[in-house]
Structure formats: structure tokens, C-alpha cells
Amino acid sequence: MPRCAGFKPNGEQCEHIVGEARAYCYSHDPDRAKERHQHARRGGKATNASLRELKAVKVQLREIADSVMDGTLETGRASVASQALNVLLRALTVERQWYEAVELEERLTVLEVEAKVEREGGRQWG
């Protein structure tokens, strides 16, 4: 089977195998550049929002630590606040995993459709 005609960022030729009717894999196909860009934008939005929340939590944790150290915050209150922020961090982790799973599912669906088209000799029914 033929290999993708595209090149990796390091200059080496892509090693993905493509169907007889195709010259490029999903990552290098110029006709799918818009689709790849849309996927990247959607993922970037989730990443940026999560990054902002992570930075805010770090700021809060530093403020709690500083307040405990200078004696303006009781250790009990600091402990409870830190626990709540830890729950928030866990929720952010779960959210990130969910977005990754959705993205992988979308990519898998695309690959399954491409594989079916290649098995059927380049014909797509439906």
C-alpha cells in the first residue's frame, strides 16, 4: 500500500499508509486543512478556558498560603479552602479528559469512514 506524500515537521516523509485512491493521510491532506483547523480551534478554546481557571486556582492557593504564613488566616479555614480548590482542580481534570475523549471519538469516526471507503475501492455510499 502507498504511503502518505506529506512530510513531518522534521522534514521526514510521513509514514502513514493511505488507500490507493488517496495521496495524503488526514494530517497532510490539503483538502482537509479547514476541518483540521476547526478541530484545533475547538480544542484550543477548551484548553484556554481551563488554563485560565488553573491560573486562578494557583493564585488563590498562593494567597491562602501567604495568609496562613503571615497569620491573617486560620489554618482550619485555609485547609477547607484548599480542599475546595482541590475539588475544583479534579473537576478541571475530568473536564479535560472528557474533551480529549470527544475529540478522539470524532477522529476515530473519520478514520473508520476513510477505512470503509478504501475497502470499497474509493466508493462512498450513503
Image: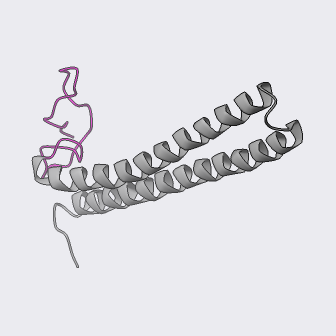
Q: Pick out the residue farthest to the bottom.
A: 126
Colouring style: one colour
| Quadrant containing the C terminus in the rendered view | bottom left
- Residue 9: image location, x then y, percent: 22, 26
- 107 vs 9, left or right, is right
The residue furthest right is 76
What main secondary structure does the magenta stretch of the protein show?
loop
Does residue 12 show up magenta in the picture? yes
Q: Which of 119 and 16 is in front in this view?
A: 16
Q: Is residue 107 above or below residue 14?
A: below
User: Up-down: is 11 above or below 45?
Assistant: above
How many numbered marks appear? 0
- Indicate left or right for 80 with 104 as reference: right
- The residue lying toward the viewer, choosing from 112 and 66, is 66
Observer-nearest of 106 and 3: 106
| Residue at position x 11%, y 53% in the image | 31
Looking at the picture, how far across and down is residue 10, in whole percent? 22, 20
Q: Which residue shows up at 79% across the image and 34% down it? A: 72
Position of residue 124 measured from the top left corner of the image (x, y, whole percent): 19, 70
Identify the magenta region: 1-29
Q: Look at the image and say whether residue 110 sits in the magenta stretch.
A: no
Which residue is found at the position 55% from the left and 50% from the top?
Answer: 97
- 45 w.r.t. 74: above or below: below
Q: Quadrant of the N terminus?
A: top left
Q: Residue at x 30, y 63 (%)?
A: 113
Query: Can you tell which quarter of the image residue 3 is in?
Result: top left
